[in-house]
Amino acid sequence: MGKKRVIAETGAGQHGVATASACAKLSLDCVIYMGEVDIARQRPNVFCMEMFGAEVRSVKSGSRTLKDAVNEAMRDWAWNPLDTYYILGSVLGPSPFPDMVREFQSVIGREVVMQAEEESLDVKALIACVGGGSNAMGFFSPFLEKDTPRLIGVEAGGRGRGAGEHAARMSGEGKEGIVQGYKSRFLLDNDGQVLPTHSISAGLDYPGIGPQLAMLGESGRIEFTSATDMEALEALKLFAREEGLLFALESAHAASAALKIAKEYKKSEAVIVNMSGRGDKDIFISAMELDRKNWSGFLESEIKRGAAVK
């Protein structure tokens, strides 16, 4: 296409790291838009992006999270269409982005089909966290035209049911609207303005959901539920101690729902959870929540040590 500059938005930082890595390999200029709040709480991924040579631009408008990062990336793209390619990170935005991202992410679902067949699993349910919905759409993709297994999307229940306390669109108070070039379900006030959101995870606090997921939810093919911040943290601890797996906080929402749903099935029946991210990226959030005293002491000692070195 002759374009030498790539831009992307990111919330939790996973998409930003992937984009920056590819750009480094292909010698392309890379700019990643990321909300100021998310930069602070996802510093390990920001460090990786910058190591790959990407410029991480802090977005200080609005809620300073993923929604605003998408806004800024779209503005950049609108002003620089000749030399810039925009890699949108979720199944959002105007056509053909939802189709493109679903297709690219479908490698996850295809691997699930293959591995389930190899292990002769009796799969009863697939569970994925849902922010914008890219990992869920890819995970569910091979099963959408079938009646089974159950497909379950887990949204951010946050810290309560009030406005600004969660990001539950399908399992909460989502309304039909048009935002950022696409029609779907959003958290909106009575005037159609986007409401603030909250999630302990940086990737699930987006106020909208991919239009295909919204349609599949309304048709009943995908079931939607939510997990609170505390439920996600409890799942994070349990899977770490019992399975040696450190879930990303986004994926821990799906893990929390799986703990409840698995009780409905026999031990011979399988419930598959998409662990869509790694937990080390959330160390500055999870450590403060689960081990505040020791983590705070460590950070204070590191600040003092750094000052002494200077």
Image: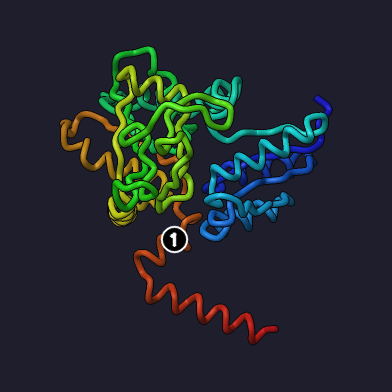
Residue 54 seen anywhere in this rendered image of the structure: yes
Which quadrant does the N terminus fall into?
top right
Q: Quadrant of residue 123?
A: top left
Q: Is residue 295 above or below residue 93?
A: below
Residue 147 x, y percent position in the rendering: 30, 14
Residue 127 x, y percent position in the rendering: 33, 33
Can you name the residue that lies furthest to the front here?
A: 191
Q: Please, what is the three-letter code of the amino acid marked with disc 1?
A: Ile
Which quadrant does the C terminus fall into?
bottom right
Residue 308 x, y percent position in the rendering: 64, 87
Residue 243 seen anywhere in this rendered image of the structure: no
Q: Residue at image x 26%, y 24%?
A: 122
Q: Residue at image x 35%, y 39%?
A: 168
Please indicate whether residue 137 sits to the left or right of residue 14 in the image. Answer: left
Element assignment for label 1: helix
Q: What residue sits right under mark 1 in the picture? A: 285
Q: Residue at image x 48%, y 50%?
A: 202
Residues 80 and 303: in front is 80
